[in-house]
Amino acid sequence: MTQQRTTCAVVGGGPAGIVLGLVLARAGVEVTVLEKHGDFLRDFRGDTVHPSTMTLIDELGLWDRFAALPWKPIDTVQVVLDAGPARIGDLTRLGRLGVPHPFVAMVPQWHLLDMLAAAGEEEPTFTLVRDAEVTDLVRRGGRVTGVRWGDGNELAADLVVACDGRDSRVRELSGLPQRDFAVPMDVWWFRLPREEDDPAGGLGRLSDDGRMIVMIDRGDHYQVAYLIARGTDAEARRGPVQALRDELTRATPWLGDRVDALRTWDDVKLLRVTLNRLRTWAAPGLLCIGDAAHAMSPVGGVGINLAVQDAVAAARLLGPVLAAADPDPAAVDAAAARVQRRRTVPTVATQTAQRIAHRVVVRNVLRGGGLGVGRLPLPVRLLQKVPALQVVPAYLVGIGFLPERAPAWARRSPAGGGQEASAKNSSAFPSGSVKDSAQP
């Protein structure tokens, strides 16, 4: 067995885990991120980067690197009902509120994670270990003191942070109590070709006969989410994929000349939707954040944004404690508990909004009840009559209920970054001693 030690072990190299590791490392905290895959190349992961996340990227001095990635801005959200089309969100209006990047950037998540990981690896106390699947928690005297990963490796830590997603292995091992909410749908994800004169931005199609489709403009293709009633995927796949092609054509006739891009059911990926949250996010030596603490519905596409905000709050609250030469366990646990207190309100508010959307919109549409025949629903009509109100859904989706800002020690000037910036920007806290250990 190979044994190493770190100050903070972060399980999961998604957006929350990498951001947490990067920000903690800029406080001088020795942090090791364990990512179970060998790379970040996963298909149909959330590819949205929201305005509040882009503000964070700015504050971290990484905007130039982000701007060089292949991304496409989306600044409007439209919905097409049987009663007609309507715009329901205008992110450009966020600019009038001082938001520096008033749009959602669609960028393949592996590019974003590669950029953030590269920035982390420029910090002397940051380590990213790939192909490192966590298999167990190490406990001593009722406290989590590390993790076991891979084939016989053990990593001791003053704090373990679970950032390993909605199917979190660490959450399962922790035994922390969880609350689950019923959801009415699952989602099929697939791609369809997009032509230059097709609708731009984000487009939703809700029909009175039970079809609900979201199309995200990715330039040369749409990333399509097709909502289905909960638990109906297996039965549908026993039939021909032509049934799905026909449904798409009936709901959106202008897509009819390209639905043949769905050759087989292998081109259609299933997202089993879950909506839950831990009642307690922390235990002695352990903290869960992001989807590991609260799995979100895809409604609004806010899960990644919420997870990143969790990571920033966690780093700000934990950084001063973990940067000590010998972190006090009681102080570490107290700081971890403060993370839950800080992030509970935005989590509950967001999930409550999603649950209302499930009951009022999704369930009615999927049952064929629609949203009313012959006219647009009142809230949608109001957004058309007073376009300035479109900033409200734009703010809730793009910024969220409690946006977090990068702590002072993690900020870099836009021209900075890399080893030079690390040298010029001394930590706000004394660096914790780097413990003797071989690289995992």
Image (tube, rainbow, N blue to C red):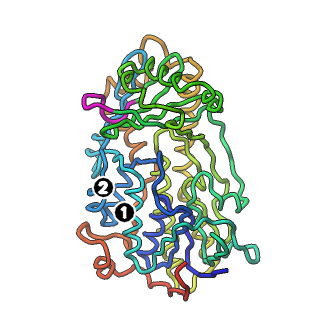
Asked if 36 appears above or below 155 in the picture, the reply is: above
Q: Which mark is residue 250?
A: none
Residue 399 position within the rendered picture, expressed as x and y whole percent measured from the top left: 40, 48
Q: Residue, x 26% and y 57% (percent of image)? A: 68
Residue bearing the label numbered 1:
115
Amino acid marked by disc 1: Met
Residue bearing the label numbered 2:
69
Q: Residue, x 36% and y 46% (percent of image)? A: 106
Residue 89 appears in the rendering: no
Residues at marks 1 and 2 touching, judged by CB atoms closer than 8 Å: yes
Secondary structure mostly seen in the magenta stretch? loop
Residue 429 position within the rendered picture, expressed as x and y whole percent measured from the top left: 43, 81
Looking at the image, the residue that sits furthest to the top is 374
Q: Disc 1 versus disc 2: distance between alpha carbons? A: 9 Å
Give left or right: position of 15 versus 132: left
- The residue stretch that appears in magenta: 194-203
Residue nearest the observer in this picture, 131 or 16: 131
Looking at the image, the residue that sits furthest to the right is 141
Residue 212 position within the rendered picture, expressed as x and y whole percent measured from the top left: 49, 26
Crowding around mark 2 (Cα neighbors within 10 Å: few <14, some 14 to 19, many 20+) is few
Residue 186 position within the rendered picture, expressed as x and y whole percent measured from the top left: 58, 35
Q: Secondary structure at mark 1?
A: helix
Asked if 222 appears above or below 409 in the picture, the reply is: above
